[in-house]
Amino acid sequence: MDKSTISLIIPSKNEAKNLPRLIHEIQETLENRYDYEIIVVDDGSTDGSVQKLKEIRHTGCHRLRIFKHEKSLGQTTALISGIKAARGEWIVTLDGDGQNDPSDIPLLLSYLLDPFKDDRLHLVVGHRKRRSDSFVTRLSSRIANTVRRRLLKDQTPDTGCGLKVFSRDAFFALPYFDHMHRFLPALFQRQGGKMISVEVKHRSRKHGQSNYGVFDRLWIGIVDLIGVLWLQRRTKIPGELKEL
């Protein structure tokens, strides 16, 4: 594992039309600024996404690495697969639908790559303050974020933003469960780490439709929220350990 490498992880399902633009924008933003790799984990797509990714790699994106789940296992598992394959110490996640703007990545990275940062800062989360979604989606997300923030006290206005930057090692110290990617701020804080939210841009989806419905998010989120609350209450973090 190379601590100077930035690993971008993109979980993707049926985003063949959105991926070329997204990968091109990542290259434009990061080339000649960082040593980086782009890892796309295809989560059982049926729209020819893998072939499109191979074409992108063949036409000059030598930093692109492609992985595939033969059947859809969900966003969290796709993220885990990508992070396990990553060669870098610092992980950047973003959604495959193109709604996250890659031009925000250097800003988020700057907090973790700052040599004077607090060593306990393990996570930087994007905050989509001006969202380009439907009214129903924005309203349901606002309600869910409010409930989650009050119960978990994770101090995060927008935990659902796909654009996040964190330490690979710190991530693997977290408990694993399906949909855990929605609760990363609370989980990192549960381990004694710190996080900050940074305002980022949000764009309309150009092609296709979301793989999640409003009610899917609602019911799954309630069950997971109860589980995370239980984890918080069962965790004991020791103070500084001194050898005698």
Image (cartoon, rainbow, N blue to C red):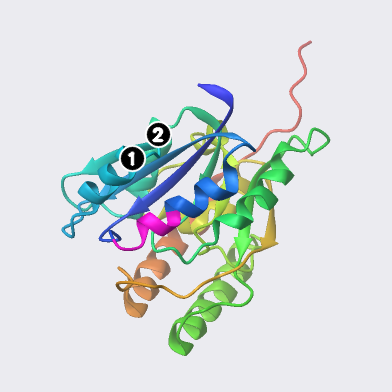
How many numbered circles are shown?
A: 2
Residue 66: image quadrant is top left
Overall secondary structure of the magenta section: helix
Query: On screen, 24 above or below 83?
Result: below
* Viewer-nearest residue: 211 or 24: 24
Magenta span includes 19: yes
| Magenta residues (range) | 17-22
Q: Residues within 10 Å of mark 2 (few under 14, many from 20)?
A: few
Closer to the camera in the image, 36 or 43: 36
Q: Provide residue 65's location: percent of width, then percent of height.
A: 35, 36
User: Mark 2 to mark 1: distance in Å?
Assistant: 6 Å
Q: CB atoms at circles 2 and 1 under 8 Å apart?
A: yes
Query: Label 2: which residue?
Result: 62
According to the picture, the residue beneath numbered tag 1 turns out to be: 57
Q: Is residue 135 visible?
A: yes
Task: Name the spot of residue 218 as percent of width and height, x first.
Answer: 39, 75
Q: Quadrant of residue 163?
A: bottom right
Secondary structure of the residue carrying tag 1 is helix
Q: Mark 2: which amino acid?
A: His
